[in-house]
Structures are given as structure tokens and as C-alpha cells.
Image: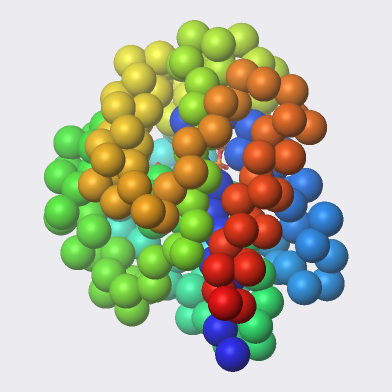
Amino acid sequence: MRGLFVTFEGIDRSGKTTQARLLAEVLGDEALGVREPGGTPAGEHVRDLLKDAAIPLGAEAEALLFAAARAELVAGVIRPALEEGRVVVSDRFLDSSLAYQGGARGLGVDEVERINRFATGGLVPDLTFLLEIDPAAAAERVGESDRFEDEGSSLQQAVLEAYERLVAADPGRWRRIDATRAPSEVHAQVMAAVDAARSGARA
Ligand code: TYD
């Protein structure tokens, strides 16, 4: 039996992490929550490297490191859980690389998709939430800063536009959600979509 693979995407401080956690909590033992980059011993080291703005990193190396962390997570954690029939909830996945590295960094979505297909063996989420918020509004929210957030709102705007293009290219998989609303309201919308996807999967 194959479980359900749900991912959360959005610009920095869009509230994805809160929503991914809430969903995993409500689903309980049936769910497995993961975050990217990270979630495996190698992946957590790669995460530290990627987040450290003091370490110079070219765009290509950055994309490959995200893909390497993802390869470990898919092979070691996500696929085994899906094979057990669990709901895997990931705070970011492949689309983050397509939007940040492919779109905002200018490497090209197709190129970044190719390296990720190699990394993941072609695993694509069943359902992906885009938490939509204006970069200026997101910047006012509290949160830790990192390599990406330090680059300011023009990068975030480019990421948002890249996400919009991904949604337009594959509308069946994506659900857009207004992330300026209260977390409880966002969560209610998330639950409704997950319930619908699960009853669709059973039907
Ligand atoms: P994350 O820890 O999820 O930050 P936040 O909680 O603020 O969203 O992700 C770290 C940063 O890495 C974030 O700015 C987005 C970026 N990122 C990419 O550029 N490409 C990727 O493939 C992933 C997974 C994240």
C-alpha cells in the first residue's frame, strides 16, 4: 500500500513550518513529519553548510547540495514511510529547489529538475500547499535569518513568482492558500484538502 506524500512550500516566513507541524500532529502516528534540507545524519550536516552565510557557495554547488540532502531523505526516510502506507508531511521539497535555485538563482527550472530526478528517483508529492504571502508582509514576521533571507525581498519576490509558474504548470497537485490568515484558518483549509485527497486515494 502506498501512503500520501504532502509538501508545504512558500517563501521564507510564510508559515509553512507551523502548518506542516500542525498537520503532522493532528494525523498522529499515521504521519511522519520531515523538513528539508535535513532529516538524515548527512542531510543535517548539509543543512548547516547551506544555512551558513559565511561559507561561499556557487549556485550550482548550492543546488547539488540540496539535491544530495534530498536523495538521502527520500531513500532513507520518505520512501520507506510511504511504503508502510503513512502520510509523509514535508516542510519543503523538490519545488523549493525549482523555485529558489531554478527560478530565483537563475539556474533554470528544467536543469534543476533534472538533477533532482536523479536524486529522488522521480518521486513527486501527491499534494503540495503553496502558502502565499507578500514578501514585505513576510519580512515583518519574526524568524531566524539565513543565507537566503539575508538577501532581502527581491530574492523572495523572485521565489514567489517562480512558485506561481510551477503552480500554473501543474495545477492538479497544488493548493494555494492565503498565508496572511490566522494559523487556525490556514490549518482548516489544509485539513480539508488532505481529507479530500485521502478519500480520493481510497475511492
Ligand atoms: P528552511 O529551514 O525551511 O527555512 P524557513 O523555515 O525560513 O523556510 O529553509 C532554509 C532555506 O533554504 C530557505 O531560505 C529556503 C532554502 N531552500 C532552497 O533554496 N532550496 C531548497 O531546495 C530548499 C529545500 C530550501
Number of numbered discs on residues: 0
Task: Pinpoint residue 69: horizontal percent, then vertical percent.
Answer: 46, 64
- Going 35% across and 20% down the picture, which residue do you hit? 157
Closest to the observer, 193 or 180: 193
Which residue shows up at 59% across the image and 26% down it? 179
Q: Nearer the viewer, residue 164 or 90?
A: 164
Figure quadrant of the C terminus: bottom right
Residue at image location 71% in from the left, 68% down from the top? 32
Question: Looking at the image, which residue sits at the far front?
Answer: 203
**Vertical placement of residue 95 versus 85, above or below:** above
> Is 76 located above or below residue 182 in the figure?
below
Quarter of the picture holding the N terminus: bottom right
Q: Position of residue 113 (x, y in %)?
A: 23, 59
Residue 4 is situated, as x and y percent measured from the top left of the image, at 58, 71
The picture places residue 15, in percent across and down from the top left corner, at 64, 32
The image quarter in which residue 160 lies:
top left
The answer to whether residue 107 is seen in the rendering is: yes
Q: Specify the color scheme.
A: rainbow
Q: Nearer the viewer, residue 126 or 111?
A: 126
Residue 37 appears anywhere in the view:
no
| Residue 19 image-quadrant placement | top right
Q: Is residue 71 left or right of residue 201?
A: left
In the visual, does 171 lie left or right of 150? Answer: left
Position of residue 122 relative to residue 151, above or below, is below
Left or right placement of residue 195 versus residue 50 in this view: right
Q: Is residue 124 above or below residue 49?
A: below
